[in-house]
Image (spheres, rainbow, N blue to C red):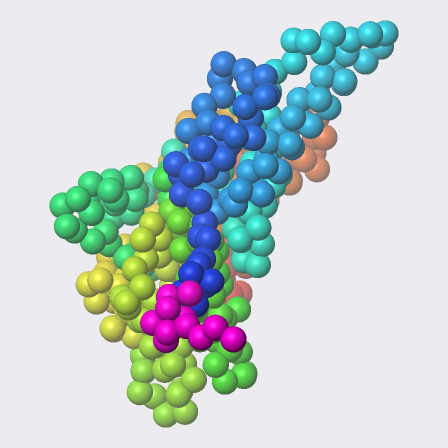
Amino acid sequence: MTRFSPDFQETLSELMRLAIGMPNREAREEILAVHTRRMPLADDVELGDLARAAHGFTGADLRAVVQEAAMHVARRFWVESAGEARPDVSSLQVDRTAFLEALGAVTPSSMREVAVEAPEVRFDQIGGYDAVKQRLRSAVLLPLREAERLRELGLKPPSGVVLHGPPGTGKTLFARALACEAEVNLVAVSGPELLSRFVGDSERAIREIFDKARQAAPCVLFFDEIDSVAMPRGGAGNEALDRVVAQLLTELAGVRPLSGVTVVAATNRLDRIDRALLRPGRLDDHIELGLPTLADRRSILGVLGGAWDVDAELLEALAGQTEGMAGADLEALVMRATLLALEDSSDRPVPSRDHFASALALLRERMGSDH
């Protein structure tokens, strides 16, 4: 029997462990070009744009996207040509709309174990908070879009930000809008979901979440209620949570880089987060979302009431009467007023002053009982 030298055996073992990673944007474009080479494409189809939007898709996923796009066009054609004896199929083309529908229908195989979204809310759909939007553009959007230039300059993009403030001020909504504005996936994680009573399970869950985020890069990794898993270390009986914080620190600023992954965390209690996580190189940018000002409330009510014609005087009056209310409270106010209007008219409910007055009284009563 032939014996190989130890060095050759080690080299052979390394070759056998060759890993095939996730395709980057250039590779995704090449894969799409291969699968669409015999497909009649419309003029509005840009494979580069589709590859940029297909974060986390493997080669098999991209093939499924192409097939789904073709099926979408076929279904649309047969519906439009219903009743024709011999419809002409020679003019069929797969357009951009079909590919976008297919991208929404096919879930990337690498991300089926975590909650991944392609958010559809933008900054202009969020009322008020202009200063917060500008800070998020500088702290998150600009580094994501200019990551390559930063690397050329030898600079490391910021790891992440913390959104903090009272409940209902829109921290989760802003995280979704960030992912949409940057045109990347949103990997959403709730802090309490990571906790487990079994030793080591929470740390493993955090490692797996960050691994999935790296595979889907570029993406926004959003931790909601991060204070539940990142409390200050050193407390009596908190050994398990101390290990969770240590794992978070390792992932944020460890040996493995977070290339293309921006971490956004949300909390109502910034003081309950371990200080090491808030230092530069980790979650170093802290953006406060306080209760909306008068101008913010006016803008939020205008956005929420966009489905009906808003009386400017009524809008101004409501903005002045809702001091101390968060965005979620204003949304509840508009919803309640619309439901009251719907009870009076099933045609096209347009809330009146009386509807808003009743809804505001109910909301204040509820908020008073909560306190």
Foreground of the two, 59 or 288? 59
Query: Seen in the image, is 285 located left or right of residue 33?
Result: left
Residue 6 lies within the magenta run: yes
The quadrant holding residue 114 is bottom right
Percent across and percent down for residue 142 are 25, 41
The quadrant holding residue 252 is bottom left
Foreground of the two, 290 or 33? 33
Percent across and percent down for residue 20 are 46, 53
Kindly identify the residue that appears in the image at 31 percent across and 53 percent down.
259
Provide the residue span drawn in magenta.
1-12
Percent across and percent down for residue 122 are 41, 37
Q: On screen, 342 above or below 163?
A: above
Is residue 205 among what the camera can see? yes
Percent across and percent down for residue 221 are 41, 55
Kindly identify the residue that appears in the image at 37 percent across and 68 percent down.
8
Residue lying farthest to the bottom in this orientation: 236
Query: Seen in the image, is 254 located left or right of residue 355?
Result: left
The quadrant holding residue 129 is top left
Residue 215 lies within the magenta run: no
Foreground of the two, 191 or 305? 191
Is residue 170 among what the camera can see? no
Residue lying farthest to the left in this orientation: 153
Q: On screen, 73 above or below 215?
A: above
Query: Seen in the image, is 239 located left or right of residue 192?
Result: left
Q: On screen, 60 above or below 189?
A: above
Kindly identify the residue that appears in the image at 34 percent across and 72 percent down.
7
